[in-house]
Amino acid sequence: MTDDVLRQAPLFSGLDDEAAGLIESSMGSVSLKRGEVLFNEGDDGNQLYVVTDGKIKLGRTSPDGRENLLAILGPGQMFGELSFFDPGPRSATCTAVTDVDLKSLGHDALLPVLASHSDVALALLHQLAGRLRRTNEVVGDLVFSDVPGRVAKALLDLASRFGRRADDGVHVNHDLTQEELAQLVGASRETVNKALADFASRGWLRLEPRSVVILDLERLQRRAR
């Protein structure tokens, strides 16, 4: 199962089994308990990571202590690849949202693969371009979208990656606290809770501890636009 999840990462895009096996054999394993920090913003680092089980969050802290979540990542997703193209301090703090298992790959181990497999370099560049696109989208949402719209969009994104369809709706076990969900959409906890309560009163979703059940996907999609 771990190998199957690992090979969902962009790092393995276009690789044959031999090349993929070569990369896997060079990767280390890391396990974190919920709340443990893998690295802090500003730390030096030259490794990329692939989540094989659990969830992690990437966040930044402003000079006045406010926190903002940049991403929630789960199995098959990758982070830390920026250091391969622009060595320097980490741009975010990485913290385990749940107990999490990761695979890590150092710069020196990846360079020979990049030299012999251009598809890997292209996949990593595609990953970076996608991240830049998402960043531009987030900036646009902060300017042009209201908080309920951003909450709806965040829930739909979480549902697309962590959702499970059932007879009563889409179960989304996001594992986030109310404060973390607020940090993800760039709003206060009170405002986000108000939006969630409104969605629940309209019958669009059902609130559960660290999760939601989306009951009316179409209405939520309309609100996210």
Image (spheres, rainbow, N blue to C red):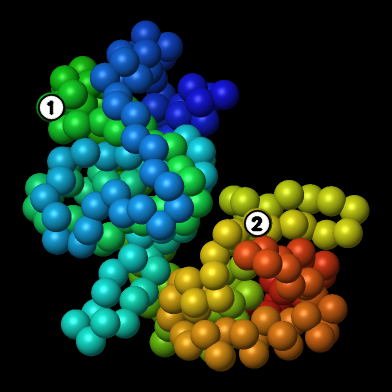
Q: Nearer the viewer, mark 2 or mark 1?
A: 2
Residue type for callout 1: Asp
Quarter occupied by the C terminus: bottom right
The residue furthest top is: 18
The x, y position of residue 71, in whole percent, is 42, 61
Q: Residues within 10 Å of mark 1 (few under 14, many from 20)?
A: few
Nearer the observer, 97 or 59: 97
Residue that carries the numbered disc 2 in the rendered image: 173
In the rendered image of this protein, does residue 178 appear above or below residue 164? below
In the rendered image of this protein, does residue 141 appear above or below residue 153? below
Q: Residue at 62% across / 85% down in the picture?
A: 193
Which label number is shown at residue 108? 1
Which of the marked residues, 2 or 1, is nearer the chain's N terminus?
1
Element at label 1: helix
The x, y position of residue 99, in whole percent, is 48, 46
Nearer the observer, 200 or 177: 177
Q: Residues within 10 Å of mark 2 (few under 14, many from 20)?
A: some
- Picture quadrant where residue 174 is located: bottom right
- Picture quadrant where residue 175 is located: bottom right
